[in-house]
Image (cartoon, rainbow, N blue to C red):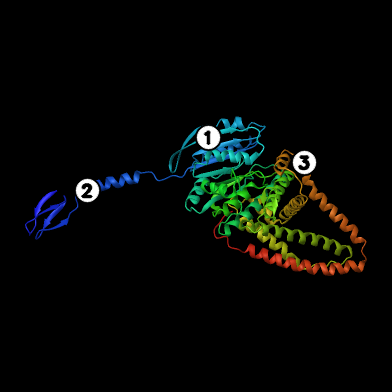
Amino acid sequence: MTDHFGQDGRPQLTEPGFANQHSGGYVQRPDPGLAAYADTFLDAVESIPTYRPTVGCVIPAYNEAETIAGVLDSLLQQTRLPDVIHLIVNNTSDDSVEIAGHYAGPHTRMTPQGEQSTIIYVHDIGKNPDKKVGALNYGYSLVEHMDYLLGVDGDTTPEPDAIEHLVDEISSDDRIGGISAIYSIDDSALDKPVEKFLIAGQRAQFSAFNMQNLLKGRNMAVLGGQFSIFSTQALREVLRDSHQRTPWVSDSEVEDSLLSLQIKSAGYLTKISAQARAHVGGMTTLRSLDAQQVKWNFGAIDLMWPGQRGDTRGQPLHPNLRLRWFEHMSMVINIVTRLMFVLLLAGSLNISAFVFSPWWLLPPLSAVLLNYRVARSMAFANRRDYLFAMLLAPAEMYMWIRMGHFVRAWLKFFSRQQSDNWAAQAKAERGKGIAWLYPFAALGLFFLVSAVAWVQIPIQTRSDMLAVGWPILGVITVLQTAWMIIKGSKRYRGYKA
């Protein structure tokens, strides 16, 4: 400091960088040394690393020898690597452990954000009675101290920027408890016509489901286990509120749906990502598709149905289940209209009373329009997807197959069968079991009994039944067609499913 004397004769202290101007007044003048220090200080502040949320990836794997290498490769190629990857192999009878073992250890790669590192651990937990649920909970115990848990199925390959998008989205809003990626199915390695047909149907089914959620504020009722990220804070609150020891429970057929409901009930949001995409494994046989869809439908019914079944409390009015109720009611209407049309058409032809009307072309044309919009909404649509939509027959056949799954799930639910649907799906994927034939046999028997009963009815009664049935079907079809036109004309607001 420097001493100066003011007009009153008293000494005044001034800081360096102050100069005397006019009648003893002092004004601040920039100090070159201070300016240089400021630049150095700002550079130091900018060099301080920002907080990077920690992500623990958990991969439950059961007999994934054919796909696990591709899954690990896709995770190591991410623009945002997980901080750690835990592969939990359980109940396996193939070479999953040996193949994954080649990936165990640290991995470092250069990304657009700089050099990143991760470590892959391979855990073989042997026989595990809780199967996938047990593997997920084992993985949770290893990463619960981290900010986020990323669940990945052993046959799911994400796009290179998928984790980056998920982390950015979930860390941007503390209200979000979990975010699911947009799922599609890779159809590039299919040989048989049946495989191509079934995968095309599943791709359309996934796309329609994804778009429905994207347009509803991106609210996602089910955080699918294929590729979803969870806030570990939200999972801890679920454990507290639900009095559970682990986030996933083995007494639900759809462990991911139940956990999603619990996260929502804990006050968090469950969302679908706007950009993160992942390719999941599809079912390439009627047998395996039947087992998967029956398991999904059965588990959804278990959550929707009022009251207590086992240890799962039915929650029919839960916000996350409203879309499920709508889907099931839509399927009931689809079953009624199709069965009525086949029966009325056959009955009319039987007594030579069928009169064609051009108006009957409107429903199938509306269906084609809607299917076309679904195909166009796909991020990775190809020629097969458009053919599936435009030819109508493939989509209609796939709908009949889904109807069989739906009816079988409800019958199984009401019969209170004590069966392990997880084991049934695993068995079906190994090419065993005949339950997938039951819907086809039941449908054939239904039409046979209907035909026998029809010919026993007097001709006048048949005519009266047709006179009543066709108008009823017409009203239902008009409402269905109007709904399809509305859905087909909706704007997708730039989303791609």
**Residue 20 in view in this figure:** yes
Mark 3, Cα crowd under 10 Å, few <14 / some 14-19 / many 20+, is some
Q: Name the residue under label 2.
A: 34
Left or right for 285, reference 374 = right
Residue at the (65%, 39%) spot, across then down: 131
The answer for how far apart the CA atoms under marks 2 and 3 are is 81 Å
Mark 1, Cα crowd under 10 Å, few <14 / some 14-19 / many 20+, is many
| Three-letter residue code for mark 1 | Ile
Would you say the residues marked 2 and 3 are in contact, meaning their CB atoms lie under 8 Å apart?
no
The answer for how far apart the CA atoms under marks 3 and 1 are is 37 Å
| Three-letter residue code for mark 3 | Gly
Mark 2, Cα crowd under 10 Å, few <14 / some 14-19 / many 20+, is few
Q: What element carries label 1?
A: strand
Q: Name the residue under label 1.
A: 120
Residue 261 location (% of width, % of height) = 61, 52
Q: What element carries label 3?
A: loop
Sequence-first tag of 2 and 3: 2
Q: Classify 426 as above or below 3.
A: above
Q: Mark 3 points at which residue?
A: 433
Q: Residue furthest left?
A: 9
Residue at the (64%, 46%) spot, across then down: 255
Left or right for 463, reference 421 = right
Viewer-nearest residue: 261 or 240: 240
Residue 336 location (% of width, % of height) = 77, 61
Left or right for 108, reference 468 = left
Sequence-first tag of 3 and 1: 1
Q: Is mark 2 on a helix, strand or loop?
A: helix
Sequence-first tag of 2 and 1: 2
| Three-letter residue code for mark 2 | Leu
Would you say the residues marked 3 and 1 are in contact, meaning their CB atoms lie under 8 Å apart?
no
**Residue 160 in view in this figure:** no
